[in-house]
Image (cartoon, rainbow, N blue to C red):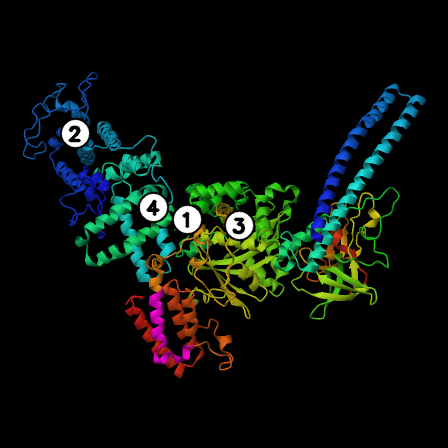
Amino acid sequence: MADPSTQASLQPRPQQTQSSGTTGSNSMPGSANCDPARPGLSQQQRASQKKAQVRAFPRAKKLEKLGVFSACKANDSCKCNGWKNPHPPTATRMDLQQQAASLSEPCRSCGHALADHVSHLENVSEEEINRLLGMVVDVENLFMSVHKEEDTDTKQVYFYLFKLLRKCILQMSQPIVEGSLGSPPFEKPNIEQGVLNFVQYKFSHLPPKERQTMFELSKMFLLCLNYWKLETPTQFRQRSQKDDGTAYKVDYTRWLCYCHVPQSNDSLPRYETTHVFGRSLLKSIFTVTRRQLLEKFRVEKDKLLPEKRTLILTHFPKFLSMLEEEIYGENSPIWEADFTMPASEGAQLGHPTAVISPAAVSSTPSFSKSNSCSTSLGTMSLDAVVAEPKTGEKRKLPEALTLEDAKRIRVMGDIPMELVNEVMMTITDPAAMLGPETSLLSANAARDETARLEERRGIIEFHVIGNSLSQKSNKKILMWLVGLQNVFSHQLPRMPKEYITRLVFDPKHKTLALIKDGRVIGGICFRMFPTQGFTEIVFCAVTSNEQVKGYGTHLMNHLKEYHIKHSILYFLTYADEYAIGYFKKQGFSKDIKVPKSRYLGYIKDYEGATLMECELNPRIPYTELSHIIKRQKEIIKKLIERKQSQIRKVYPGLTCFKEGVRQIPVESIPGIRETGWKPSGKEKCKELKDPDLLYNMLKNLLAQIKTHPDAWPFMEPVKKAEAHDYYEIIRFPIDLRTMTERLKNRYYVTKKLFIADLQRIITNCREYNPPDSEYCRCANTLEKFFYFKLKEGGLIDK
Amino acid sequence: MALVSADTKISELLTELHQLIKQTQEERSRSEHNLLNIQKTHERMQTENKTSPYYRSKLRGLYTTAKADAEAECSILRHALDKIAEIKSLLEERRIAAKMAGVYSDSDPPRKTMRRGVLMTLLQQSAMTLPLWIGKPGDSPPPLCGAMPASSDYVAKPGDKVAARVKAVDGDEQWILAEVVSYSHSTNKYEVDDIDEEGKERHTLSRRRIIPLPQWKANPETDPEALFSKDQLVLALYPQTTCFYRALIHTPPHRPQDDYSVLFEDTSYADGYSPPLNVAQRYVVACKENKKK
């Protein structure tokens, strides 16, 4: 479907349709090998042809041309700023055949000779003359553009550039765009870096060939962006009602001056869009650009090379959707200046210092500000300012995030935001009311609640520190490292002290240190393997008299956020028997998803220890997770209370469970619909309309099954006397008689329930009996039979 | 029903406590005038630079009044403290009754569902709210105030916290924090529950294996003799655990709310002792065995 609005926007500007180098070939759109998608010559091509033509003129002709843009120097009083030909050429002005005007030819407006206008060019090199001529051609082009352009904003910029170039010809200077636009690059990291980070971040786990595909897609996307015509500020304002478009207008003007206009007017310095702009521009243009891009590909799909066609039509939309998540996502790591590419381990390890900010999510795209510290401070330093927990401010951040998330991922039957906000208002923090007794936490407080409060109050601090051999040592860090070594060796008495020392002071290992009153009271020593995509937890301990306060949990949560920032999403560790419990509570499991080849030979292997893994979810703000969940629970509780006060009806409890029914469909519970509960999925609309119809069908079907010659083993419940251990092995026994009863009780309100019970008869039989037994043979035949019948009755798809 | 009546009893007591506190303030405002008088009289004597018999008798009268006022205020405060003690004991009774009946309220869930961290906070809380013993002038601190040992025939009541020497599964003996369940006068044995019900163990122990914990804090400013002194060997609850270990007093508390600073015996440190750690008065008891095992 062509979007009429975008089509309309494309129409009045003929130069833009060619500007998208989107056909997948890596050739630049302006180059000579003409693309079938681009009819005729691009404006850029025309401009360069014209320039070549002009530059091939004899000198006299060149001077005449420049004279038109040069001030008269006959005397001081003459204000004429360009020689006007007294005999305007009849044919095309640039006709080669036409004789060059003589230097003595007087100007139509001031009467002075052409020579008086071009006297300053006498001793100027041919090269400079050619440069000026280039500007002349561009000025002429811009003049045309100013006339053709209908959008006021764009027109203004064209006119400004037109004047700028004219001035430069007059003064023989270099064109420099001045004013409040700033100079490129306008944002860091730039779009190209962000998109390449995205490819690393999302696809580095893929096999090389697929990774290459994704890389090519990213290159193509960047190329498209560089030649893509942006929508005008007016269109932008119309599209996004919320944004007033001031910021976009600035970006648009920058783009015109530095990227777009220089493409066809090469006397202006040119920059690539993806090099000088960053996430904020991409945020403003992505939705529209994506739609236009995909539409263009769709329209032009027949002109694409066959091998590119599959790539573009199958992978590109998905690629763009994934990219979209990272562009608009709250805490995407790809826009971090210090995003570490898994491929560049060597460089990465040179910086064992980093800072844990209280929340790993940076809500504002203030890239340079928040990131400069970790790179510039060098190896042996830390930034206490950032590491200081910010009271008050911190609390808000994750809440805003959850709300933001809730907004983004709309779920069916979601509660309107206004209602949630309203409920939020009524939930007052109970701790705020209680006066001096707040330190007494309720019995079901989260494990890390105390630690979180203490961090907020500045009682405890978290810092990632490490030793360095190349950098001068900071005494405080060294003291902390010694403190860590002491804590580890006291708490892990089975580890040789020398071994602990070696690793804590090893420059490739880092330690997240927990500091209280300036002293180390705990820490997690770890080694990152960015190339392998995991981090090894080496030591983890809290000093004995500070245990059971939630510090261990809070430490691990900080470590998780630190790793999300650095795009490593797997922890591996060899846990000894006392540590397994701790790691389980921190979300570690004995199921290892990281392939063995990735960690074998990298991780330190300990005898008698258990390998455990933790997979991180980059969307979770771990240090605030328990708090967020607590809030969510409170909200749900309030919502339930509200609902209860609206619906004042009490139903008698269900009795069917006492009678041996194991499960009933949720929708059959009296009153459940009144609470606003809706069955999920589509089957309800198909089936529930006529329960009697379903009942009769199932009754008929069950009767047929019961008369099948191979149904005899399944007619009645298995007797314990016949198979004494049957009920120990089979947890959910079922048989045809029970099914008949259930049918009679109207238990089978969906066909799904009925089929599930039928299938269970078969699976139970196969589980209990050997495969070559008579029972299993019956089960096989019966299964075939009833599936045939189900299909026949249209209860399942054929 | 018993629980309900305890509730009403507590709310009655709280009302009385509230009134007592108000009375204290009234008493204070009343005596304020007299104290001001004393101050003024002193100033006047200063300026006149002589002690006339008039002033002498006036001051005597004023001071007698002030003393009476102070005593009245003091008795109200003591009365209020008694009320607090009564409320606490009622709460304790209720807790024990609930425990016996296996009924738990929301605010006091069964231990086994309690996180260890919460248990630790409760233990700290109980140490912090241990009442401070305030004697009348000339009174000496009673048994179980601070370091004062219980009398030899003392029997701990059900619900009291004690240090109990138990045999662990591996045969090692350990002093644990426990709660008295009952005492049998016929066998002279205690039944105690491990406070840390993760073990869910009930122990039957002879008297000498039980050390009752102090029931009052000693005030270092008025009753320093009721505190352990520096370098004395004690049993102290290791922070964030429910076990008592041998330790040396590093520094006794200086103010009523201060903790002891103690050095635990710990062979993993070069000098055989841990760095100084803080332990509340509530959890420091005399160590009977003076010889190291």
Identify the disc placed on residue A66: 2
Give the quarter of the image for residue A606: bottom right
* Residue B53: x %, y % from top left: 94, 22
How far is the residue under mark 4 from the one under mark 3?
A: 38 Å
From this view, report whether residue A601 is shown above or below residue A563: below
Task: Between label 4 and label 2, give the one nearer the viewer.
Answer: 4
How far is the residue under mark 3 from the one under mark 1?
A: 19 Å
Seen as rendered, the residue at the extreme top is: A77
Which residue is disc 4 drawn over?
A191
* Residue A326: x %, y % from top left: 37, 49
- Left or right of B129: which side holds A350? left
Q: Amino acid at mark 4?
A: Ile
Q: Pick whichever of labels 4 and 1 is earlier in the sequence.
A: 4
How far is the residue under mark 4 from the one under mark 1?
A: 35 Å
- Tag count in the figure? 4
Tell me the crowding category of disc 4: few under 14, some 14 to 19, or many 20 or more residues within 10 angstroms, Cα based. many
Which residue is disc 3 drawn over?
A630
How far is the residue under mark 4 from the one under mark 2?
A: 40 Å
